[in-house]
């Protein structure tokens, strides 16, 4: 079956507001565009860009997402302490280095002090390896085989469609053999839940950021000596479809 990647992204005054992607058969393109438009147009925009591309290779079918673990904390400082511990265990990086990187995400990791347009890449020596520090790397070409069913299942358990999107994205990241952990906080000032992923689990931490902070971003922690071009190729190009959510 021919499958298509459908991406919509909204911006205002030249600044990205939000975006989403679906992988869908030809017959559902119209429906998917409408669904994404409904979602994106809730925010004030002056431009919406729609991109439709046929998938050039068959998607990798994955049985399940990472298992979801919910953790709640008194405040974002306590949550970040746990985040540092989880990342330290996976990467072997010093706590100080991890704190430094996390602080950068909370204060704008792009060289101009704004949010990056994608994720930072950091190896086990603490080196930043993204090709462009303004852009970073963006994970795309990932969706659920039966998105409606998965979203229903997640909502029944108290999650949202945002969780479905983040869970799919990070599950794809953790499929790559050289990516060992991820840290993420949203750039929305009122969305305080963030996550850490490892090969074993998707840890949802609430609150991982301070209310009102417009800064956000992601850090992909990778093994030393990993093939960076291979990571870009896999995360940006390889289509992945996930069958079920492990909740
Ligand atoms: N932040 C800022 N700018 C962005 C952006 C982002 N997240 N995504 C796209 N843009 C802008 C950039 O200027 C980009 O140019 P660049 O490649 O030089 O940075 C331009 O739009 C063109 O982007 P495009 O090549 O079409 O983007 P893409 O193939 O990476 O897809 C999304 C963009 C938003 C559709 C894709 O990243 C996506 O679906 N992300 C999933 C979002 C999600 O589910 N998040 C989890 C929720 S918690
Ligand atoms: P979001 O999860 O959409 O709130 O995005 C939070 C941050 O993650 C953004 O500010 C970007 O720095 C980064 N980001 C956004 N989209 C992607 C993506 N597709 N892959 C990797 N990083 C992303």
Image: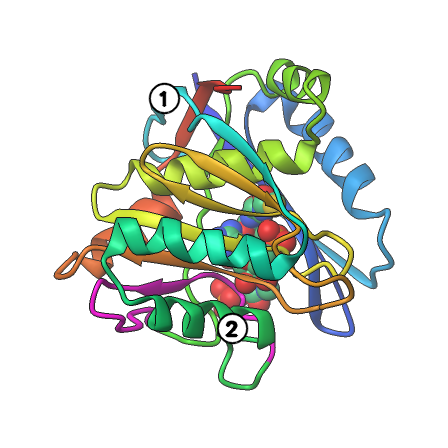
Q: Residue at x 59, y 62 (%)?
A: 77
Q: Position of residue 41 (x, y in %)?
A: 83, 48
Element marked by disc 1: strand
Q: Is residue 215 magenta?
A: no
Say which quarter of the image contains residue 2.
top left
- Which span is picked out in magenta? 114-131
134 and 160: which one is in front? Answer: 160
Q: Residue at x 34, y 32 (%)?
A: 200
Identify the mark at residue 205; answer none if there is no mark: none
Q: Position of residue 216 (x, y in %)?
A: 60, 64
Q: Is residue 115 magenta?
A: yes
Q: Callout 2 environment at 10 Å: few (<14), some (14 to 19), or many (20+)?
A: few
Q: Residue at x 70, y 31 (%)?
A: 160
55 and 180: which one is in front? Answer: 180
Question: Is 72 displayed left or right of 109 in the figure?
Answer: right
Question: Is 2 displayed left or right of 157 in the figure?
Answer: left
Q: Position of residue 79 (x, y in %)?
A: 56, 53
- Name the N-terminal-most of marks 1 and 2: 1
Element marked by disc 2: helix
Q: Quadrant of ligand 1?
A: bottom right
Q: Quadrant of the N terminus?
A: top left
- Confirm if mark 2 falls within 8 A of ligand 2: no
27 and 223: which one is in front? Answer: 223
Q: Is residue 8 visible?
A: no
From this view, report whether residue 122 is shown above or below residue 54.
below
| Residue that label 2 marks | 103
Q: Position of residue 235 (x, y in %)?
A: 36, 47
Q: Is residue 241 visible?
A: yes
Identify the mark at residue 62; answer none if there is no mark: 1
């Amino acid at each position: 079956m021919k499958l298509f990647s459908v991406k919509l992204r909204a911006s205002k005054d030249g600044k990205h507001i939000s975006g989403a992607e679906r992988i869908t058969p030809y017959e559902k393109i119209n429906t998917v565009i409408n669904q994404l438009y409904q979602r994106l147009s809730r925010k004030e925009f002056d431009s919406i860009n729609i991109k439709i591309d046929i998938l050039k290779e068959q998607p990798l079918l994955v049985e399940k997402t990472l298992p979801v673990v919910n953790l709640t904390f008194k405040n974002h400082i306590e949550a970040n302490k746990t985040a540092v511990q989880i990342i330290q265990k996976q990467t072997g990086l010093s706590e100080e280095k991890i704190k430094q990187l996390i602080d950068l995400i909370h204060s704008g990791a792009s060289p101009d002090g704004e949010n990056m347009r994608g994720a930072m890449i950091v190896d086990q020596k603490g080196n930043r390896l993204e090709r462009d520090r303004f852009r970073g790397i963006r994970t795309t070409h990932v969706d659920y085989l039966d998105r409606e069913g998965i979203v229903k299942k997640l909502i029944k358990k108290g999650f949202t469609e945002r969780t479905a999107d983040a869970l799919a994205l990070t599950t794809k990241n953790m499929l790559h053999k050289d990516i060992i952990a991820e840290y993420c906080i949203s750039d929305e000032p009122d969305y305080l839940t963030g996550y850490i992923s490892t090969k074993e689990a998707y840890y949802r931490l609430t609150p991982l950021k301070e209310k009102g902070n417009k800064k956000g971003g992601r850090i992909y922690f990778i093994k030393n000596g990993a093939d960076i071009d291979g990571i870009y190729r896999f995360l940006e190009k390889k289509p992945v479809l996930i069958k079920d959510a492990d909740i």
